[in-house]
């Protein structure tokens, strides 16, 4: 298991007839966290830097736009060295 930090926010104003109400948006964000956690742990959970033996740390930033009802998620990776950052990104993106 590696450390994953989430920074998920909602932006924009809801339309008059939103597809998802507030509770459903909360549920969507929670289930998104759950899926991302599984994905990251599957790909990187056991991976350690071959040089330094350190795990990567992943920061997940996401914005749910209430107006367009789109969720944008990006991954940030912190690690002991550039090689580990690049290797972790490659493993995550595969
Ligand atoms: Zn390293």
Image (cartoon, grey):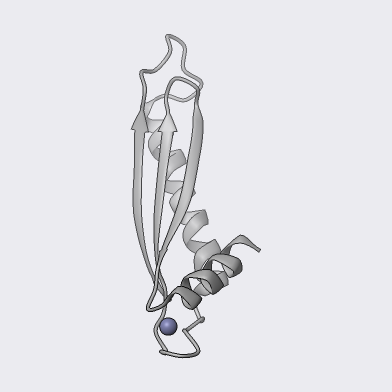
Q: Residue at x 47, y 11 (%)?
A: 17
Q: Is residue 33 above or below residue 54?
A: above
Residue closer to the observer: 46 or 94 = 94
Q: Residue at x 39, y 17 (%)?
A: 14
Q: Quadrant of ligand 1?
A: bottom left
User: Where residue 56 sits: x, y (%)?
Assistant: 42, 74
Q: Residue at x 42, y 9 (%)?
A: 16
Quarter of the image that includes the N terminus? bottom left
Q: Is residue 68 above or below residue 3?
A: above
Q: Is residue 13 above or below residue 92?
A: above
In the shown orientation, is residue 25 left or right of residue 92?
left
Quarter of the image that includes the C terminus? bottom right
Residue closer to the observer: 28 or 94 = 94
Residue found at the very far top of the displayed protein: 16
User: Where residue 42 sits: x, y (%)?
Assistant: 56, 70
Q: Is residue 75 above or below residue 3?
A: above
In the shown orientation, is residue 3 left or right of residue 41?
left
Q: Quadrant of residue 25?
A: top left
Q: Quadrant of residue 2?
A: bottom left
User: Where residue 35 sits: x, y (%)?
Assistant: 52, 55
């Amino acid at each position: 298991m590696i450390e994953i930090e989430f920074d998920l926010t909602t932006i924009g104003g809801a339309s008059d007839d939103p597809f998802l109400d507030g509770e459903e948006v909360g549920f969507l964000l929670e289930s998104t966290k759950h899926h991302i956690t599984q994905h990251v742990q599957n790909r990187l959970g056991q991976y350690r830097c071959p040089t330094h033996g350190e795990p990567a740390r992943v920061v997940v930033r996401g914005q749910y736009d209430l107006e367009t009802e789109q969720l944008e998620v990006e991954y940030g990776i912190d690690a002991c060295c550039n090689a580990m950052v690049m290797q972790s990104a490659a493993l995550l993106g595969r």
